[in-house]
Amino acid sequence: MRGSSCCTPETTREPTTGPVEMLPAAAPRPDSDTVLISGGKALIGTARPLLPQDGEGSLREKRVASFRIGVACVTNRQFAGFIKQTGFVTEAERFGWSYVFHHHVAEGVGPTQGVLDLEWWRRVDGATWRNITGDGVDASVALPDHPVVHVSWNDARAYANWVGGRLPTEAEWEHAARGGLGDARFPWGDDEPDDTGFFPCNIWQGRFPEENTAADGYHATAPARSFEPNGYGLYNMAGNVWEWTSEPFVVRSQRRAARAAAEGKKGYRLLKGGSHLCHRSYCYRYRIAARTGNSPDTTTSHQGFRVVWPGG
């Protein structure tokens, strides 16, 4: 197995028997808690890029229509309702395994295979959205309010389609994450989280990947509605779980090295927001402009999603 970026391992799995089923689109029926985001000029990127190889800059404007967005990521409870009503089978279930961070692999799982150059990511047979760490505990019961994980881009799109919505574009996601602040580094402003006293989001504290002090209260995911929401009332737009978007991962860069690296990621889908495994010393991607990509069938214990619907 090989790595993708520093943040997310790439799946190298044998094809399953056919594509993921796309359920018929429902009439728009937003989940109970959404926020209406007014349309207009949305900012994308930043005038202060820190990881140019990811295509963070430059700061650009794009007009977006009004839209509704979930105040939080889709939870285990919500996803369980989707599974119960549709019988949908996720890609991790079809493949029979998923990626789990090494600290979170359940005791008794036995030997696991690591990812080349990202050995802290372990292939765990039987890991799925319901069986997050391989311990067989039903996440919809044990962690009903946490964001669903081990869902691929294809799985997320199927859920969004089922509720009559879709995954956000990058412009919509950043417009919502900024909460009206403009070219701010984080959803709360420019103040940097640290390891000792300022914990505005769920990221890593300590020495990655050996020691997470969990000074913010969480070794893995936090509830989807935790920490202070941003100016639009949206929770965890930084940290906790990476969020799938509707767009392909494209690097807009004049740097030859960046373009060459992007060539190996054709077909990847864009993720935003960072996760509980991010830290400034290693994966400084819990900033609004930060971005990464992964193959649309990849599933991990730190990737989730939220849904948008038409405004009005």
Image (cartoon, helix red, strand yellow):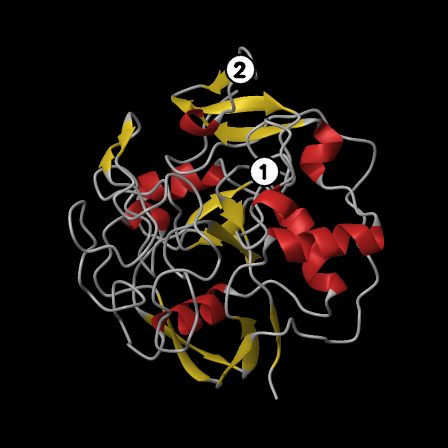
Numbered disc 2: secondary structure = loop
Q: Is any part of residue 152 visible from this angle?
A: no
Is residue 187 depicted above or below 53 in this figure?
below
Numbered disc 1: secondary structure = loop
In the rendered image, which quarter is residue 59 located in?
bottom left
Relative image position of residue 120 (x, y in whole percent): 40, 24
Tell me the amino acid under the disc marked 1. Answer: Thr
Q: Circle 1 is placed at which residue position?
A: 299
Separation of residues labelled 2 and 1 (CA atoms): 16 Å
Q: Residue at x 79, y 42 (%)?
A: 19
Q: Circle 2 is placed at which residue position?
A: 112
Dot 1, crowdedness within 10 Å: few (<14), some or many (≥20)? many
Relative image position of residue 105 (x, y in whole percent): 49, 25
> As drawn, is 112 to the left or to the right of 162?
left
User: What mark, if any, has residue 248 been given in the picture?
Assistant: none
Q: Is any part of residue 39 visible from this angle?
A: yes
Relative image position of residue 216 (x, y in whole percent): 28, 48
Is residue 208 depicted above or below 40 in this figure?
above
Tell me the amino acid under the disc marked 2. Answer: Thr
Relative image position of residue 213 (x, y in whole percent): 25, 36
In the rendered image, which quarter is residue 121 located in?
top left
* Closest to the observer, 202 or 164: 202
Q: Are marks 2 and 1 in contact (CB under 8 Å)?
A: no
Q: Earlier in the sequence, mark 2 or mark 1?
A: 2
Residue ranking furthest to the top: 111
Q: Residue at x 64, y 35 (%)?
A: 128
Looking at the figure, which quarter contains the C terminus?
bottom right
Is residue 169 depicted above or below 158 in this figure?
below
* Closest to the observer, 125 or 281: 125
In the rendered image, which quarter is residue 307 located in?
bottom right
Dot 2, crowdedness within 10 Å: few (<14), some or many (≥20)? few
Depth check, mark 2 against mark 1: the one in front is: 2
